[in-house]
Image (tube, rainbow, N blue to C red):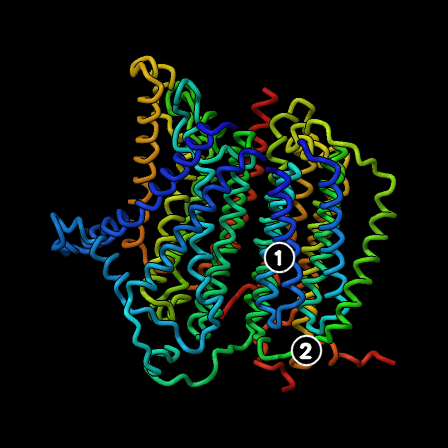
C-alpha cells in the first residue's frame, strides 16, 4: 500500500463516515414532518423554506444548553456513556457496500470502507457492543428510572440479537459467503427471468425476521420499551444533558441507517437496479466512475426508502408491552429463524440434488 | 488482516467526532450549578430511597439464555459457510446440523415448558 | 508496522487485564475486562485469525461480559469495600505467579518449533470444514452440553426477586 | 506474515502475563464475581497461546480447540454466576470470606 492508496483510503473513509452522519439532521426533519403528515398537523415549518433549516436550529439549541453533571453520578462512566454508544454505531458502517468500485489513475477502489471477509459477523459483533454505553450510562446515572431503562433496553436488544443472527445465518447459507460485497454481487440477474434475483424473493421469511429484529435492535417504536415516557421518564438517558441526549439520538439514527444498509445489501440487491445487468449499464454510460455514482445513488435511494418506513411504522403501530415483546422474540421469532434455516438448507439440498 | 486497516482509520475518525461533541458541549453551554438542579431526578420530588432496586431474576435468565443461544447461533455461521460446497458429498452436513438443531429446539421447548421468561 | 501494532495491542491488553484486578469496584473490573477482550481480539487479528477475532467479540465481549455486568449492576456491590491490598504481599505473589506461568509455558511449548509461518490458507473455510468433518462428534456433544447447561441454570436459579442485601439481611 | 521470532517471545510474554494476572486475581481477590472474571482472563491467555501456535504452525486444530474453550467458558460463567446469585441470596454478600461453613 503506497501513499496515494493511503490518502484515497482515508478520504474515502472520511467521506462515507461524514455522509452517514448527515443522516442525522436529514432524519430529524423527515421524522418531524413525517409525524406531522401522519397526525394531520403542520409540523415545524417556520425556520427556512418549509422548515428545512429546523435541524440546524435544533442542533444550535442543543449546543447552547447548560451542561449538567448531576451530583450523585459515577462521573467517569457517566461521561463515557454517550461515546460508548456512538463508537460502535460508527464502526459498524465499515462493512456496508455502497457500490461496486470506482477508479482513480486506472486503479480500482471499492466503494466500501473495508472489504472484510467476515463482514456479517463483524456487523453482528460490533453492533452488539452498543449495549455497553446504555448499560454503563444508565447505571452511572444512579437513578432508578435510568437503571430500569438500561436493563430493559439491554434485555430487549440481546433478545432480538438472536433472531437477527439466525436471519443473517440463513442469508449466509443462501449466498455461501460472509462478505456483504459478495452477497450483493450474487444478487445480480433475474430469478426464472421474471423477478430480480434479490434476497427478499429468495429469503422472504429471513427478510421479515431481519426487518422486525432491526426495529427492536434500534429501540424504535413499536419496540421503544426502554423509554416508555409514561413509566420510565426518559429511560436510560433521564439524567443526561441535551448534547448527550443528542449523541444518543445520533447513534440511534446511525444504527437505523446501518440496519437499512444491511437490509439493502442482503435482501434488496445492493447497488443493482432491477432487470438491468451491470455490464449493460456500463455500456450505456460509458464510464466506470459515472456507473459508480449511479450505484451510490441506487443504494442511498433504497436506504432512504427504509428510513421512511421506519418513520411511517413509528407513527402507525402502538407500543408493545414488555412481556409481549419477550414472547414475540423467544416464542415466535427464534423458532421461525430456526425453521427458516432448515427450510433454506433443505431447498439448497434439493436444488443441488436436482 | 490488511482489510481491517480502514476500520482503524474509521475508529480514529469516530474518536475525533466523539471528542469534538464532548468539547463543543463543554465550551458552548453555560454552567450555573445549583444543588437542586444537580439532584437526582425523580419526577420533581426528593428521592425516596437509593437507586438500588431488588434483583429481578428474570433479567439474569434472559441474559443467560441469550449467552447460550448466542454461542449456539455462532456455530451456525461456519456451517452455513461450507454447506453449499459440501452438497456434492451427500447430505452428511445437513443431517449433522439437524441433530444439532434438534438438541437446540429441545432446549427451547424446555424453556417454554418452565415458562421462566415471564417478566412482571 | 505490524510489530508496532502488536506491541500497542499487547500493552493495552495487559494494562486492561491488570485493571480487572486492581479496580475497587466490580463495575470497573467488568469495564476493564471488556477492554482487555477487545485488545485480545486485536491480537487475534494481527495473528491473521479474523474469524476467531469476531467470535471473541461476539461471544466474549458481546455476551459473557454482559452477564457479568448484569449481575454486578443488579446486585449493586459497589458499597462493599475490600481491605486495601498489602503491596509487598501482592508484589511477591505477582512475581512468583509470573515465574510459575513462565516455567509452565516453557515446559508446554518445548516441542513446538518456533519456525516462521507459511502462507496462511483460506482460513475461514478450512476451519469450518474441519469443524464438521474431523471434529463433528465433539461438536454434537457441545450441543448436548449446552442443552444440559440450560436445564442446569433453571435448576439452580430460583425465580422471583432477590431483595437488596439478600434474603437474610 | 513477516513476523520475526522476537514477536513470538513478545507474544509469550503477553500470554504469561495474562495467565499470571488471572491466577493472581483468582487467588487474592475476595469478590466472587472478580474471581470469575480472573478465570476468564486465564482462559483467554490460553486461547491466545493456542491461536498463536496454530497460526504459526499452520494447523487449524488449535483454533477449533479455542471454539470449544469459548463454549465451555460461556457455560462456566452462566453456572458460576447462578451460584454467586444463590450465595448472595443466602448471605447478602458475595465476599468469599463469608462462606466458611464447609471449613473444618
User: In percent of the image, x 58 and y 19: which residue is there?
Assistant: A354
Question: Where on the picture, by quarter, is residue A79?
Answer: bottom left
In the picture of the structure, the residue carrying the numbered disc 1 is: C64
Question: Where on the picture, by quarter, is residue B88?
Answer: top right
Mark 1 closeness class: few <14, some 14–19, many ≥20 residues within 10 Å: many
Callout 1: residue from which chain?
C
- Residue A61 x %, y %: 23, 61
Q: Is residue A202 visible?
A: yes
In the image, residue C140 sits, relative to residue A219, either above or below, namely above
Classify the position of the C terminus of chain C by image quarter: bottom right
Q: Nearer the viewer, residue A273 or C111?
A: C111
User: In percent of the image, x 50 and y 32: which residue is there?
Assistant: A115
User: In percent of the image, x 76 and y 62: which residue is there?
Assistant: D23
In the image, residue D54 sits, relative to residue A99, either above or below, namely below
Which label sits in the foreground, 2 or 1?
A: 2
Checking the image for residue C84, the label placed there is 2
Checking the image for residue A21, the label placed there is none
- Residue A120 x %, y %: 52, 39
Amino acid at each position: 500500500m503506497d501513499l496515494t492508496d493511503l490518502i484515497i483510503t482515508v478520504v474515502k473513509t472520511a467521506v462515507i463516515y461524514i455522509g452517514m452522519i448527515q443522516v442525522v439532521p436529514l432524519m430529524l426533519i423527515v421524522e418531524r414532518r413525517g409525524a406531522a403528515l401522519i397526525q394531520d398537523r403542520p409540523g415545524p415549518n417556520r425556520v427556512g423554506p418549509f422548515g428545512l433549516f429546523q435541524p440546524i436550529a435544533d442542533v444550535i439549541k442543543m449546543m447552547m444548553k447548560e451542561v449538567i453533571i448531576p451530583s450523585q453520578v459515577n462521573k467517569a462512566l457517566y461521561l463515557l456513556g454517550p461515546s460508548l454508544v456512538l463508537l460502535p454505531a460508527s464502526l459498524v458502517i465499515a462493512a456496508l457496500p455502497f457500490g461496486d468500485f470506482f477508479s482513480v489513475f486506472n486503479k480500482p477502489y471499492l466503494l466500501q470502507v473495508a472489504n472484510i471477509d467476515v463482514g456479517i459477523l463483524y456487523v453482528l459483533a460490533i453492533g452488539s457492543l452498543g449495549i455497553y454505553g446504555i448499560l454503563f450510562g444508565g447505571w452511572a446515572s444512579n437513578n432508578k428510572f435510568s437503571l430500569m431503562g438500561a436493563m430493559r433496553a439491554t434485555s430487549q436488544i440481546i433478545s432480538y440479537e438472536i433472531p437477527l443472527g439466525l436471519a443473517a445465518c440463513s442469508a449466509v447459507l443462501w449466498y455461501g459467503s460472509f462478505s456483504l460485497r459478495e452477497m450483493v454481487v450474487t444478487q445480480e440477474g433475474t430469478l426464472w427471468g421474471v423477478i430480480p434475483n434479490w434476497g427478499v424473493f429468495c429469503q422472504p421469511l429471513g427478510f421479515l425476521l431481519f426487518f422486525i429484529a432491526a426495529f427492536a435492535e434500534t429501540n424504535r417504536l413499536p419496540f421503544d420499551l426502554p423509554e416508555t415516557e409514561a413509566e420510565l421518564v426518559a429511560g436510560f438517558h433521564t439524567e443526561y444533558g441535551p448534547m448527550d441526549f443528542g449523541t444518543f439520538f445520533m447513534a440511534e439514527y446511525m444504527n437505523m441507517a446501518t440496519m437499512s444498509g444491511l437490509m439493502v445489501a442482503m435482501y434488496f440487491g445492493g447497488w443493482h437496479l432491477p432487470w438491468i445487468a451491470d455490464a449493460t449499464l456500463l455500456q450505456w454510460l460509458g464510464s466506470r466512475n459515472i456507473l459508480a455514482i449511479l450505484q451510490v445513488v441506487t443504494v442511498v435511494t433504497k436506504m432512504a426508502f427504509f428510513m421512511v418506513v421506519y418513520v411511517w411504522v413509528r407513527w402507525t403501530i402502538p407500543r408493545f408491552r414488555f412481556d409481549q415483546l419477550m414472547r414475540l422474540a423467544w416464542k415466535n421469532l427464534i423458532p421461525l429463524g430456526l425453521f427458516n434455516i432448515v427450510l433454506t438448507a433443505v431447498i439448497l439440498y434439493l436444488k443441488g440434488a436436482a | 488482516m490488511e482489510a481491517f486497516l480502514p476500520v482503524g482509520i474509521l475508529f480514529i475518525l469516530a474518536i475525533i467526532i466523539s471528542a469534538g461533541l464532548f468539547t463543543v458541549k463543554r465550551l458552548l453551554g453555560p454552567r450555573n450549578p445549583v444543588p437542586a438542579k444537580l439532584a437526582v431526578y425523580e419526577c420533581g420530588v426528593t428521592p425516596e430511597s437509593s437507586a438500588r432496586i431488588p434483583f429481578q431474576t428474570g433479567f439474569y435468565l434472559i441474559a443467560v439464555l441469550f449467552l447460550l443461544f448466542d454461542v449456539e447461533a455462532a456455530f451456525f455461521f461456519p456451517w452455513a459457510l461450507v454447506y453449499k460446497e459440501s452438497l456434492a458429498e451427500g447430505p452428511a452436513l445437513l443431517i449433522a446440523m439437524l441433530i444439532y438443531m434438534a438438541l437446540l429446539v429441545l432446549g427451547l421447548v424446555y424453556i417454554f415448558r418452565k415458562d421462566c421468561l415471564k417478566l412482571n | 508496522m505490524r510489530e508496532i501494532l502488536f506491541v500497542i495491542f499487547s500493552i493495552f491488553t495487559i494494562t486492561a487485564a491488570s485493571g480487572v484486578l486492581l479496580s475497587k469496584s466490580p463495575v470497573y473490573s467488568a469495564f476493564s475486562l471488556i477492554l482487555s477482550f477487545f485488545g485480545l481480539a486485536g491480537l487475534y487479528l494481527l495473528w491473521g485469525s479474523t474469524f476467531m477475532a469476531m467470535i471473541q467479540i461476539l461471544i466474549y465481549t458481546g455476551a459473557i461480559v454482559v452477564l457479568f455486568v448484569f449481575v454486578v449492576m443488579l446486585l449493586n456491590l459497589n458499597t462493599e469495600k475490600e481491605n486495601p491490598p498489602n503491596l509487598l504481599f501482592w508484589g511477591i505473589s505477582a512475581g512468583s505467579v509470573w515465574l510459575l506461568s513462565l516455567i509452565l509455558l516453557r515446559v508446554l511449548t518445548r516441542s513446538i518449533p518456533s519456525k516462521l509461518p507459511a502462507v496462511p490458507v483460506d482460513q475461514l473455510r478450512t476451519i469450518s470444514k474441519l469443524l464438521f468433518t474431523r471434529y463433528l462428534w465433539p461438536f454434537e456433544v457441545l450441543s448436548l452440553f449446552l442443552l444440559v447447561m440450560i436445564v442446569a441454570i433453571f435448576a439452580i436459579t430460583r425465580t422471583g426477586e432477590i431483595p437488596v442485601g439478600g434474603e437474610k439481611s | 506474515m513477516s513476523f520475526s521470532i522476537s514477536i513470538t517471545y513478545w507474544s509469550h510474554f503477553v500470554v504469561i502475563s495474562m495467565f499470571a494476572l488471572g491466577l493472581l486475581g483468582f487467588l487474592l481477590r475476595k469478590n466472587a464475581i472478580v474471581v470469575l472474571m480472573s478465570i476468564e482472563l486465564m482462559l483467554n491467555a490460553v486461547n491466545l497461546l493456542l491461536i498463536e501456535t496454530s497460526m504459526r504452525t499452520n494447523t487449524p486444530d488449535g483454533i477449533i480447540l479455542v471454539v470449544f474453550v469459548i463454549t465451555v467458558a460461556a457455560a462456566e460463567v452462566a453456572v458460576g454466576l447462578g451460584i454467586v446469585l444463590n450465595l448472595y441470596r443466602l448471605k447478602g454478600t458475595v465476599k468469599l470470606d463469608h462462606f466458611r461453613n464447609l471449613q473444618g
